[in-house]
Image: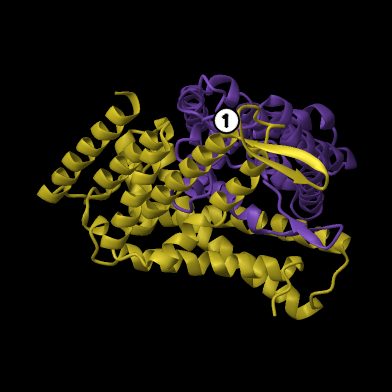
Chain colours: A purple, B yellow
């Protein structure tokens, strides 16, 4: 889902930077206010964790492997605002240092993966798990559904961003300048693969990690921070 | 032989190649080449200017010129051409070529016929608009990715993250960025050793359901270990003088060479902009 440089036009890139700037400012204010000094390193550790989650290959039927994005998991563990900062940092390092995702597309990538993904996932998880006990199966199911649905929502946004490029950037002769596929192709393509393949990997990983933590470290699933 | 369909071996290989690539990249950044000798702040800003120019460019000849400039800069910075091409073309540009192919045809991009084909009895035409649109798209992606890779290869990773401070981003991001980069390597090493331990105990043939549990449990165990690490890190920060605000040393120095480079970039940018919009 990492959008590289050259796929989105300059106005789209600029628009998403403009959208993300106030969100980053709000996130840093909320997290600074609510995180105790002792918990400061957890943001960096959370960012490294969300970076490394993608290195865990998960087997899928048919003999191949996939990997989870982990955005919803980090949001459940850290809260949505802290997760937003942690994922932003991971995405900036990926783009700037490891060439994964474009520099001009950092705004759009952060909007999809550091804002839409953790917030949608976190609130779906909250709505389904409601006030159930920390060790309940309902929370495991809620985490799985949240992982699957939030990834699909984020993918739909990415598909939409790709799909509007031919509408905005086309020469008089009909030649496209950026992503060549319109909404009728880009949106179903992005949604289809994430609903049918990657979404399931995300759901399985998010649910199983929550199940494991329920058994081994339930205190990590309890709500402590005020930013939730 | 590595079985790339096996998730255990794939994770180990992925982690090891990540570490190897990082070491290789740092070796290039330490060489005494042209780009390595520039102030990282000036270099990062000028490369961002180049990437923005590429995004605005609508003429493929300008993109070819920019790509040639990128290769020239790489060669005077002592970057091995083969290594650079491999690093910049895999994976995004090759993937972009693959997804641009359907856009050549009239079913996606209608327009004037350039070439008429018959594939499995189906009549297809490559349109002029489709061909030039797809070429421009691929050229833009290749050129911008190449500049980003060149910046990464010629700048020490830690310096590259330190440069972000000039953009006046909130302190919490600056601190998190610096710390995060260090922990990535620790965590990648944990991932690699964990999977190596699993491989030595259970072999490589595992049912995919068991494999999914195994991967998820390892992610959860990594989070547990990370969370416990938090207190140690905080104590280490306190022992180094952390009192709630972080300070970073600013050891960047600009030289005459940097300003000459800025002048050259201004001239190139003006020329490219004139060619685009003049």
Question: In the image, what residue occupies the spot 42% across and 61% down?
Answer: B84
Residue B66 appears in the picture as rendered: yes
In x, y percent, where is residue B267? 20, 36
Residue A40 appears in the picture as rendered: no
Q: Nearer the viewer, residue A69 or B94?
A: B94
Query: How many numbered marks are there?
Result: 1
Question: In the image, what residue occupies the spot 76% across and 66% down?
Answer: B5
Q: Is residue A37 above or below residue B56?
A: below
Quarter assignment of residue A73: top right
Q: Nearer the viewer, residue B225 or B49?
A: B49
In x, y percent, where is residue A146? 78, 35
Question: In the image, what residue occupies the spot 43% across and 44% down?
Answer: B144
Quarter assignment of residue B78: bottom left
Q: Is residue B196 above or below residue A224?
A: below
Quarter of the image that includes the N terminus of chain B: bottom right
Question: In the image, what residue occupies the spot 33% across and 47% down?
Answer: B162
* Label 1: element kind: helix
Is residue B184 rendered to the left or right of residue B36?
right
């Amino acid at each position: 889902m990492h959008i590289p440089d050259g796929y989105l036009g300059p106005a789209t890139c600029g628009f998403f930077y403009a959208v993300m700037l106030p969100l980053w400012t709000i996130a840093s204010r909320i997290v600074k206010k609510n995180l105790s000094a002792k918990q400061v390193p957890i943001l960096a550790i959370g960012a490294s964790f969300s970076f490394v989650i993608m290195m865990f290959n998960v087997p899928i039927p048919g003999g191949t492997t996939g990997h989870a994005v982990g955005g919803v998991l980090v949001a459940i563990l850290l809260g949505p605002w802290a997760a937003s900062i942690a994922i932003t940092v991971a995405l900036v390092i990926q783009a700037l240092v490891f060439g994964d995702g474009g520099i001009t597309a950092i705004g759009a990538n952060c909007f999809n993966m550091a804002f839409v993904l953790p917030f949608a996932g976190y609130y779906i998880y909250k709505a389904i798990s409601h006030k159930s006990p920390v060790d309940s199966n309902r929370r495991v199911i809620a985490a799985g559904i949240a992982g699957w649905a939030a990834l699909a929502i984020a993918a739909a946004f990415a598909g939409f961003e790709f799909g509007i490029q031919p509408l905005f950037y086309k020469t008089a002769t009909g030649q496209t300048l950026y992503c060549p596929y319109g909404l009728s192709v880009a949106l179903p393509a992005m949604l289809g693969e994430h609903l049918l393949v990657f979404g399931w990997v995300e759901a399985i990983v998010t649910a199983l990690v929550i199940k494991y933590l329920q058994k081994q470290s339930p205190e990590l699933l309890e709500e402590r921070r005020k930013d939730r | 032989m590595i079985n790339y369909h096996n998730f255990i071996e794939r994770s180990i290989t992925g982690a090891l190649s990540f570490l190897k690539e990082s070491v290789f990249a740092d070796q290039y950044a330490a060489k005494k080449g042209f780009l390595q000798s520039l102030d990282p702040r000036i270099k990062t800003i000028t490369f961002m200017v180049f990437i923005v120019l590429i995004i605005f460019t609508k003429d493929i000849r300008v993109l070819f010129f920019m790509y040639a400039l990128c290769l020239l800069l790489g060669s005077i910075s002592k970057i091995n051409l083969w290594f650079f091409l491999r690093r910049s073309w895999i994976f995004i540009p090759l993937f972009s070529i693959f997804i641009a192919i359907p856009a050549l045809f009239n079913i996606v991009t209608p327009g004037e016929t350039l070439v008429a084909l018959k594939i499995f009895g189906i009549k297809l035409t490559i349109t002029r608009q489709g061909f030039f649109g797809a070429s421009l798209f691929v050229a833009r992606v290749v050129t911008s990715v190449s500049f980003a890779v060149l910046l990464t290869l010629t700048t020490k990773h830690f310096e590259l993250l330190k440069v972000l401070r000039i953009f006046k981003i909130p302190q919490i991001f600056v601190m998190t960025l610096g710390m995060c980069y260090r922990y990535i390597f620790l965590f990648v090493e944990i991932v690699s050793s964990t999977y190596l331990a699993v491989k030595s105990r259970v072999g490589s043939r595992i049912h995919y359901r068991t494999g999914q549990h195994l991967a998820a449990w390892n992610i959860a165990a990594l989070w547990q270990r990370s969370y416990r690490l938090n207190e140690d890190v905080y104590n280490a920060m306190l022992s180094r003088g952390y009192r709630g605000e972080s300070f970073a040393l600013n050891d960047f120095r600009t030289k005459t060479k940097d300003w000459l480079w800025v002048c050259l970039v201004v001239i190139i940018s003006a020329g490219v902009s004139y060619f685009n919009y003049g």
